[in-house]
Image (spheres, rainbow, N blue to C red):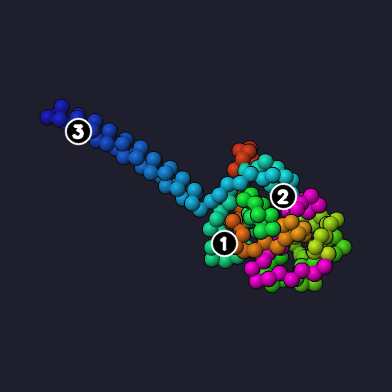
């Protein structure tokens, strides 16, 4: 009887170990599938988002962040520019929302005639580009700028222009690489 009991205990330990290994594998596979379908990765090329995101940083983009609502002011988004026809994702910060009037004058951003308050970056803007004149955003358009305002190709330039909601890939969620810089993006 003791031999039977010992074998039973050994089989129970083996069975529990196998169950634990299978559970861990299932969690890893499920997490991989969820991240693969709900997120995208892109590597930043250039310094237009410094100091928030640096050149050659790899970021994770949440593709479902705007499934039920649009971006909010100062959200960091990834989008495919309509004017360029590129498959590359651009990363910029939302400054102007649909229906607003944007203008850059005297180096500052004005929304509906009022100076933009609480901007994440209060740098004097040297080049206003097409925003030197008032721009009225349509119901599906966003005005986006890089955080490094004087070294960014963004909505101020006709090569990028206004960002349509249909071209927004998602919200930039976190910096993945380099690992020493792993963090969430504000």
Q: For this rendering, which residue is in front, 34 or 114? A: 34
Taking the image as shown, residue 153 lies to the left or right of residue 44, namely right
The residue wearing badge 3 is 8
Query: Which image quadrant is residue 6 in?
Result: top left
Q: Which residues are magenta?
A: 133-154
Q: Secondary structure at mark 2?
A: loop
Q: Residue at x 57, y 62 (%)?
A: 66
Query: Which image quadrant is residue 69 in?
Result: bottom right
Taking the image as shown, residue 18 lies to the left or right of residue 47, namely left
Q: Quadrant of the N terminus?
A: top left
Of tags 3 and 1, which is closer to the observer?
A: 1
The residue wearing badge 2 is 49
Q: Residue at x 65, y 54 (%)?
A: 85
For residue 90, the mark is none
Relative to 161, say whether 48 is above or below. above
Specify whether residue 151 is painted magenta.
Answer: yes
Taking the image as shown, residue 157 lies to the left or right of residue 72, namely right
**Answer yes or no: do the residues labelled 3 and 1 have beta carbons within 8 Å?**
no
Q: Secondary structure at mark 1?
A: loop
Specify whether residue 21 is painted magenta.
Answer: no
The residue wearing badge 1 is 66
Taking the image as shown, residue 185 lies to the left or right of residue 100, namely left
């Amino acid at each position: 009887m003791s031999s039977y009991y010992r074998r039973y205990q050994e089989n129970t330990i083996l069975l529990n170990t196998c169950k634990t290994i299978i559970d861990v594998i299932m969690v890893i596979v499920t997490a991989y599938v969820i991240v693969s379908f709900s997120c995208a990765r892109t590597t930043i090329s250039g310094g237009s988002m410094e100091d928030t995101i640096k050149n050659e940083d790899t970021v994770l983009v949440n593709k479902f962040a705007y499934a039920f609502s649009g971006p909010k002011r100062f959200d960091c988004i990834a989008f495919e520019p309509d004017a360029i026809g590129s498959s590359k994702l651009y990363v910029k910060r939302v400054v102007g929302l649909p229906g607003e009037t944007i203008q850059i004058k005297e180096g500052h951003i004005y929304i509906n005639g009022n100076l933009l308050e609480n901007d994440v970056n209060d740098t004097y803007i040297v080049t206003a580009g097409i925003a030197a004149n008032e721009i009225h955003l349509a119901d599906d358009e966003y005005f986006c700028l890089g955080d490094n305002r004087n070294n960014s190709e963004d909505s101020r330039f006709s090569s990028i222009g206004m960002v349509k909601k249909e071209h927004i890939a998602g919200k930039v969620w976190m910096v993945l690489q380099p690992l020493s810089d792993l963090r969430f993006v504000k």
